[in-house]
Image (tube, helix red, strand yellow):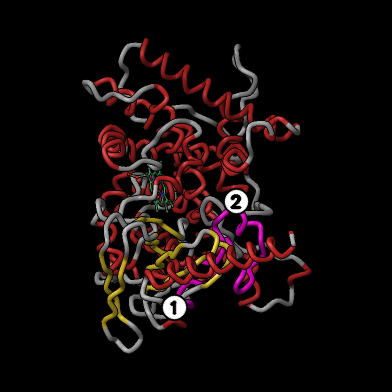
Amino acid sequence: MLSRIVATLAVIYVLKRIITFRRAASSVGNLGGYRVLFNGLSPIGALLKRLPGLTQGLNHALEDKYSIHERVGCDIVAHVTAFPPVAHLSLADAQAIKEVTISRAKFPKPVDVYKPLLFFGHNIVASEGETWKRYRKITAPAFSDRNNKLVWDETIAIMNDLFENVWGDKEVITVDHCRDLTLPIALFVIGVAGFGRKMTWKEDNVIPTGHRMTFQKSLSIVSANTLAKIILPDWAMRLTEKTREIALGFDELKAYMLEMIDARQKSQKVERHDLFSSLLEANNDEDGEALSTDELIGNIFIFLLAGHETTAHSLCFTFALLALYPDEQEKLYQHIKSVTPISRVPTYEEMPLLTQSTAVFYETLRLYPPVPIIPKRCAEDTTLTTTNTQGETVVIPVAKGTSVDIYTPALHYNPKYWEDPHSFKPDRFLKPDWNRDAFLPFSAGARACLGRKFFETEGIATLTMLVSRYKISVKEEPQFAHETFEQRKERVMKCNFRLTTT
Ligand code: HEM
């Protein structure tokens, strides 16, 4: 009898799931796309292997690029999951994306998705509406031209310190993983241009009184372990020596930030252009709307998080592509040489002339966008318009509450906008007519990246310094001696989606 009741309840449960699943699919006009049990980005989906019908996997946006849109024959597709029973629209249509990014009230950020980023305090990335407006108003002025100049000068100094005091007169430098080089560069730049704290390649190991680790170490631990902090509950952080060190890194960074706030509020006003100082200054000038200490820390922390990993990995992808394409590297070298003599360091004012460096970066960001999915949620019943393979107009119903996600790899590999989209061709960005609406690594509209210029400045300074002094190549290893170019490219460029593309 009991087993019959259980079986009946199970059947009812399954039927209910099927009905809600079908309802979710029909809410977006039964548009083609994945039909899976678990969303690849959900906690359960992330643990499972990619399998048709089960989950599309954590890396699907990076792996699929434009292929699902091509298969469905439409630049907007719908991924429907049973747990939870929702439809996610995946956009690869530049016009539809433009509509979404410019209509902030109609397509706001789904702030619930960003909740894990709140552990240091409320911040600009994880907020919406009036709170976001207030954060943006106070934080945006920190990303000034004077800050960009600081980024440039400090990046040059960090690279010079590397060349002179670490690499010395060695002819060949070998790094096992390019990330071992780019993560510290990005960390030192955000350390000095973000927090006003100079760091060097030879770490100063003196721990200040009242602290248990140096600022440099705490910043390095925090930037490398945000994902662990997000995933693990507090009790789990106390379990092993490694997780205890991570927890200490977070506590210490917060303690340093509190000290810095206190010291700068007490000290005489000195003209400084790091993000932290500018943020404090703007905050002091605010009447009535100033940020609380928690909000200040939350926002400066999010600059670190938003800026460090994206920058370090993008530099890494750039170097790897230049190593794989020596002709492009040579072209870049010749261009740098034509703009600035190799015997002296380039100045910030010369940055706009380094057009080939910008083109190399953009092409890297097109092929390996650091944020593969930019989520939005529809705030009212509406429609989105796109075209299918036959060139016909397709109008998609979008009910209030539907997830509307910008899939940057799908957009960046869409052959409608990019000729030969799988090839590395930086020169496409030197032509005046490339489609700005089809290039979205930094998002667009009011919620676009605040640190774009910060990144471009740092990236161009690093690239220019490195390429003008060294030739970058892939390390030759006997076990890979017989691989083809395509195999080598696949091995070297292998990437995963974690918090960003890594
Ligand atoms: C390769 C480098 C970078 C890329 C590709 C990138 C990309 C992005 C993207 C796609 C967004 C929108 C995210 C969303 O809608 O959830 C964003 C927002 C943001 N980024 Fe970046 N970013 C980069 C570097 C930086 C740097 C260096 C900083 C700061 C130092 C920074 C600070 C921010 C901030 C504060 C926001 C939130 C803006 C707002 O919501 O109003 N980013 N970035």
Q: Residues within 10 Å of mark 1 (few under 14, many from 20)?
A: many
Q: Is residue 232 magenta?
A: no
Extreme residue in the right direction: 479
Q: Amino acid at mark 1?
A: Gly
Q: Is residue 59 magenta?
A: yes
Task: Identify the residue shown where x is 68% and y is 31%.
Answer: 235
Q: Which of pointers 2 and 1 lies earlier in the amino acid sequence? A: 1
Quadrant where the image shows the C terminus: bottom right
Tell me where residue 10 appears, x and y as whole percent.
Answer: 64, 64
Work out whether 136 lies above or below 83.
Answer: above
Residue corresponding to mark 1: 32
Q: Do tag 2 and tag 1 residues touch (Cβ < 8 Å)? A: no
Tell me where residue 136 appears, x and y as whole percent.
Answer: 29, 38
User: Between residues 167 and 433, which one lies in front from this camera angle?
Assistant: 433
Query: Is residue 65 rendered to the left or right of residue 239?
Result: left
Where does the magenta region start and end?
40-69
Task: Identify the residue shown where x is 41% and y is 67%.
Answer: 90
Tell me where residue 184 appears, x and y as whole percent.
Answer: 57, 41
Q: Amino acid at mark 2?
A: Arg
Residue corresponding to mark 2: 179
Quadrant where the image shows the N terminus: bottom right
Task: Identify the residue shown where x is 48% and y is 33%.
Answer: 191
